[in-house]
Image (cartoon, rainbow, N blue to C red):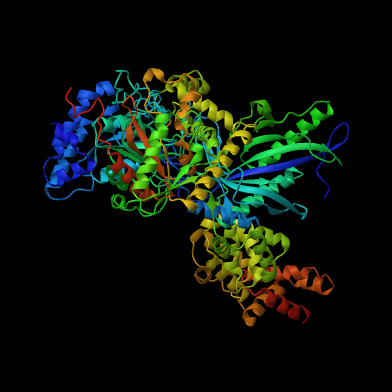
Amino acid sequence: MSSVFNYTLASAREALRARKISAVELVDAHIDAIERLDDGLNSFITRTPEQARLAAKEADALLAKGEGGSLCGLPIGIKDLFATEGVRTTAASKILGNFVPPYESTVTANLKRDGAISLGKLNLDEFAMGSTNLTSAFGGVENPWKRRDSDAKLVPGGSSGGSAAAVAAGLVLGATGTDTGGSIRQPAAFCGITGIKPTYGRCSRFGTIAFASSLDQAGPMARNLQDCAILLESMAGFDPKDSTSVNKPVPHYEAALGRGVKGLKVGIPKEYRIDGLPAEIEAIWQQGINWLKEAGAEVVDISLPHTKYGLPAYYIAALAEASSNLARYDGVRFGERVSGASLDALYEATRAAGFGDEVKRRILLGTYVLSSGYYDAYYLRAQKVRTLLQRDFLKAYETVDIILAPTAPSGAFAWDEKPTDPVQVYLNDVFTVPASMAGVPALSVPAGLDSRGVPLGLQLIGRFFDEEALLAAGSVLEKAASFTHRPTIHAGVSA
Amino acid sequence: MSAYRITGETGEWEVIVGLEVHAQIVSQSKLFSGASAEYGGEPNTHVSLVDAGFPGMLPVLNRECVAQAVRTGLGLRAQINLFSRFDRKNYFYADLPTGYQISQFEHPIVGKGTVEIELSDGEIRHIGVTRMHMEQDAGKSIHDQDPTRSFIDLNRAGVALMEIVSEPDIRSPEEAGAYIRKLRQILRYLGTCDGNMEEGSMRADVNVSVRREGEEGYRTRCEIKNVNSVRFVMQAIEVEAQRQVDIWESGGEIDQETRLFDHVKGETRSLRTKEDAHDYRYFPEPDLLPLVIEQSWVDELKAALPELPEDKRARLEKEYGVSRYESGVLTAEQSVADFYETVARGADARLATNWILGDFFAALNRTGRTIEDSPVSAESLRELLSLISDSTINGKIAKEVLEDMVETGEKASVIVDRKGLRQVTDTGAIEAAINDILAANADKVAEYKSGKDKLFGFFVGQTMKAMKGKANPAMVNELLKKLLVS
């Protein structure tokens, strides 16, 4: 049994093609693991074992003929922000009720086209708003990792917390995530897995429930970079149904993995050395610098002068868009409705009952910053900061090819350590937000464990549409770190 | 012309009007979705998931709608902005599925232009156009089908509109009416809006304020929303201006507010005050890229534009010698102008003008037809006129033939042959008829000869009657003159 859970997406792909294992066996084993472990982890909101078993049979038929796409028969999970035809899609909110979309998001349609098999819909912060996965209306997700000295439940990070936890625990071979200000990278770091936030426009947003349209970007989460590369190649591509998706050919990402970093210039932004950065984070960052140097990269100090404005500007820009994007959840056409004596009463009752506190807080903030009299002071300024942040990166990329930074200012913290001040929670995004605001691609790879045995991630930020450089450099870090630790709760570990 | 003035107890008042005209763009599909933009249809049958605001749905701009907007801008002799942008206008309403309308707030596709209007006394005025932008329409709320519930029809949701905003250059109800009619005419010529106000494809928000004669600057205005006919726009301005004058004169103040025109009661009513006004929280639409178009594309569209009403009017006057009044009637609709030119080209233009404006229009009126479904084609009418020109029939017979053509749809020459209506030009036959008449009316002949010239007409009438109207009138005149003196 345990051997099944040693597979990565790539090695499972080889095993399936070599008929060492059938898709049915592979899928059954993972469904079984979900049944054993996920009542506790709560990484799935909706499980779809029947559909998965049917798909596995079809995959086996194709594989037997030597056919099937690049992901044929591989079990994955889908963040419950992607609309899936015929399968309940919740955004981890009560307001969508039992909404079953009659359509499929482009990203999941691409994965399906290539033969991936979804085992269900993964938990997240409500409407992807959060970095703990504790704002889900379907309950928080437990990080499969535990501190050496404690049994306390840790947060998996967010918003793609369900995706990160399910991958880390071996319940799926890969998962989709979405990243608006760090929602792929931070949970990947917290759960000791790998995640890529591609360049804005690389993956279609069609059918993905919007949080902040100008920032949202889908990306892969998996156990290693090769798996992420395989998934990204399937997910990415121009989509005429999304006007902001970019019409550029999708490279064969796997090919970039072995490229190495000889001669590559790596920038270390001095503004990321923030006050109070834990020594362990400093240390892992330095470790990353050394690894890249040893592999032949040239490391230089750079400046991204507007970094400190990134976080406040992000929370203005993102929440402004969110306040508008979430207006459609009004109880009129789909989802939950709480009746009222008038239209306004229906809106108020529906939205009061349907949205959680964090979502309400963000709608209020977003509405405020767009209000007449405040627009110039907040929204317009945030847009200007955004331009400056983008310029920072473009200027840096005149001298360096890639930027190395920590992914998050700490490792995973315990559920009950979550700060009561929401602004403290927002600080989790301090290293991930600038790349989101600029639209450039970034990834997180696991680099080691902190003193309490919890994983820490390193972040690489690249040029527009140069995900390949990220993969090449990330692969060097991955090899050097040789992160083979497994979380406490894992499908391959007998209870 | 004397300016439009409202006479109050304390003096004369001038009315200041600006119009925001919403015109539905003629297109196959909606502004941001593939759903049909056709009017009518069972409720909620022309609705895509994008129109209904389903989660994860994204707008995709319809290029044809942009082309239509550019054509319209060119037709208004306006500036075309190569860079424009869509914004979200946020407000909650049950027939607005996404909770925001996608519009162009800060950067419209069309800038300043002008519309030339002609008033009933022939005075020409130029009304400035401030801007024109594209936006999507909302759906329709239906409140009168159930005592407790409202129904929503999303067929119209997402349909492309142009909002054409005028400068406050309009000074009377008549000018407002002329402006809307002219706008409608231009849009119909361009084929960018069908101008059908009954179906709601054109409607206007009317901004009205008043000021004392000779006063500088503007006083507070009120906006009358969604007026859906030219007549109602004119009435609304009249009653609203009067209401404002009454308030000012009694020492009151006008509150800036949005009002509704009740055409049954002939009054405007407050809809919402400035305090209740929506804060639309406009911001750039993040789901769409800024709209950047090429000058070469604009040039291409410009080259392919149809002839505009003013140009056509000037040309008809020059080419066919029609009067200013006649050219106005003939170019009111492009289809009429086309019909006219088909008839008049290569024919006797004066004859064509007289016949079309006279007997032909009368026949259309009588049969309740329009030029589009005219019972007589332009080609048939031209043939009829050619029969007059070459003296095959005379004008009087031609009227009879036209009636027959309307009834039977037959060609003029077929009717003339069938009924034997060919004009008689045989001198002998006409002379014989005249001689009979003179012989039978010897007393009248004597009176005529003694100086009663008026009797000439009597002899003409008798002769034509005897010849069943088919005699060539000129020949009858000539022969009568000769025979009466002999």
- Viewer-closest of A403 and B485: A403
Where's residue B267, x and y in %? Answer: 69, 30
The image quarter in which residue B325 lies: bottom right
Residue B313 placement (x, y as % from top left): 67, 63
How many numbered circles are shown? 0
| Side of A235 relative to B460 (left or right) | left
> Looking at this view, is A10 or A297 the one in front?
A297
Position in image of residue A210 (x %, y %): 43, 36
Residue at 23% from the left image edge and 24% from the top image edge: A37
Q: Nearer the viewer, residue B307 or A207?
A: A207
Q: Is residue B135 at least partly visible in the picture?
A: no
| Left or right of A132 on screen, residue A324 | right
Give the camera-side residue of B486 and B417: B417
Looking at the image, which residue sits at the far right?
B10
- Tell me if residue B308 can be seen: yes
Residue A464 lies, with reference to residue B102, above or below; the image says below
Q: Position of residue B317 (x, y in %)?
A: 69, 67
Q: Is residue B451 above or below residue B154?
A: below
Residue at image position (48%, 48%) is B61
* Viewport quadrant of the C terminus of chain B: bottom right
